[in-house]
Image (cartoon, helix red, strand yellow):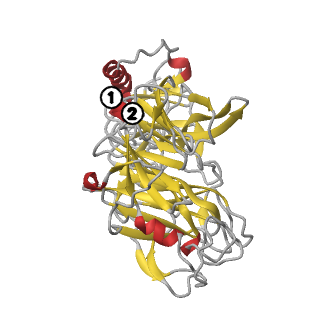
Amino acid sequence: MGTTNRPGSRAPKRRLLGLLLGAALAVAGVIAPAQPAAADSFDGLELELSNGPWPTSHVQGIAVDAEKGFIYYSFTTLLVKTDLQGNVVGTVGGFTGHLGDLDINPADGRVYGSLEYKAAEAFYIAIFDVDKIDEIGMDAQNSHVVSTVHLQEVVDDYAADMDGDGDFDGNIANTPDHRYGSSGIDGTAFGPKFGRADGKQYLTVAYGIYKNVDRVDNDHQVLLQYDTSKWAALERPLTEADPHRVGPKKVDGKYFVFTGNTTYGVQNLEYDAYLQRWWMGVYKGTKPQYPNYLMFAVDAKDKPKMQTLTGLGGEKGLLLPLADDGLQDPATGIRGWNQDASVGIQSLDNGLYYIAKQTKSAGGQGSVITLKSWTGDANAPFATVTADFEYPWQRDAVYTAGDRVPFDGSTWEASWWTRGQQPGDPNGPWQEIVTAPDGAAVWTPSRIFTAGDVVVHGSQRYSAQWWTRNQEPGGQNGPWTLIG
């Protein structure tokens, strides 16, 4: 029988992290100081990392490149690059706009982030050639590590004169202007086309949404998808004094998610390929008719449907349903979690995440990221990981024969491929594994035994005469022989 406690086929990635980190540091010419062993880490990942303080605004997002061994932080006007143990490798500053959420493009290894210049009505994806970031104090406009692509679709919605008075009101929340209540862009992530869990990866960009409680057309999250495979021809250097307008002529998909009110929309967007799910971290909304959750999710395979959008005067759009778990508001049916993921959430595979929180001191703004595990619990969706952590059973995970998980105080082993089948059924895919102090197997209803297996049951020992499951020792004419 197997002994692994890692679900699915993606688990070996964790065992490579130490080797990958060493190789990445050697290539970069950076020597990391010696770090304490296992007490402060799990499976090659630090349990908690602090970054900063920096003389900037607060942390806006994080991106982790486990293969190359680096973490990237956005601090609004500054990008910080560290290794996986928190040692600073380099920074890129000089932004006068708003640098938001980050993600890594799996196709080219570069970091993509939202970048706003609201006064100039210029909204970009900033693209960082992160392999060239190797010193502190690099400048975004003069160091040749940053290029930008303009998003005209965002401008059109942000600068929309919705009241038709011929005067766009600018960066003001309490105005009828801004289509959908758009305040610009924030959340950024790569993932599959909505409705799929595989295939080409698209850059997905989430609108910021003003919370304006006096309007009814700002209760959807707006998500744009772009195929970036041909963006090289559109990239231009960042020139803040003379913003360029070069970018894709159209979006490759525009989608809506009805969440109710939020404050500034999706601040952090993340796709988890393991759970096949999109996460949306927001600042809490204030409209009293909504639950105003802090985090929402969309399952990757749920297909968008063209429907009439709430509060938009009959306008139709591609609507994505919220994931069918978490808390549920009985009045509206809206589902979500009271989990803060607004300043950084990064999937690390196998249900592990880094979740960021902001810190502040006399020296400026900082961040602490903590290693968490997805639990599936509506009230406590993430648990803090410790050095002796074991991967728990997860409803959305795939398990194969031999995988072991802790569940409800016991250890369970998969007998065959399974997904979504909770341990506990004595005839199901899971066997409860219990061992006596002397190492002998303890009989449990769900465990499979074959001829010759010896078990402890009560104060007696029995030997199996043939294959058996869910047949309690002690009965007459059964598969068990009492041996002492």
Q: x and y percent of residue 383 in the render?
A: 59, 40
Q: Is residue 369 left or right of residue 431?
A: right
- Please name the amino acid that badge 2 sits on: Ala
Q: x and y percent of residue 226 in the render?
A: 34, 61
Q: In the figure, 179 relative to 141: above or below?
A: below
Q: Residue furthest front?
A: 241
Kindly identify the residue that appears in the image at 56 percent across and 33 percent down. 385
Q: Residue furthest bottom?
A: 314
* Label 2–label 1 contact, CB within 8 A: no
Count numbered badges in the picture: 2
Q: Residues within 10 Å of mark 2 (few under 14, many from 20)?
A: many
User: Residue 66, which numbered label?
Assistant: 2
Kindly identify the residue that appears in the image at 55 percent across and 28 percent down. 47
Q: Earlier in the sequence, mark 2 or mark 1?
A: 2
Residue situated in front as seen by the camera: 439 or 201: 201
Question: What residue would you read off at disc 1?
Answer: 452
Q: Residue furthest top?
A: 34
User: Tag 2's secondary structure?
Assistant: loop
Kindly identify the residue that appears in the image at 32 percent across and 47 percent down. 417
Residue situated in front as seen by the camera: 470 or 251: 251
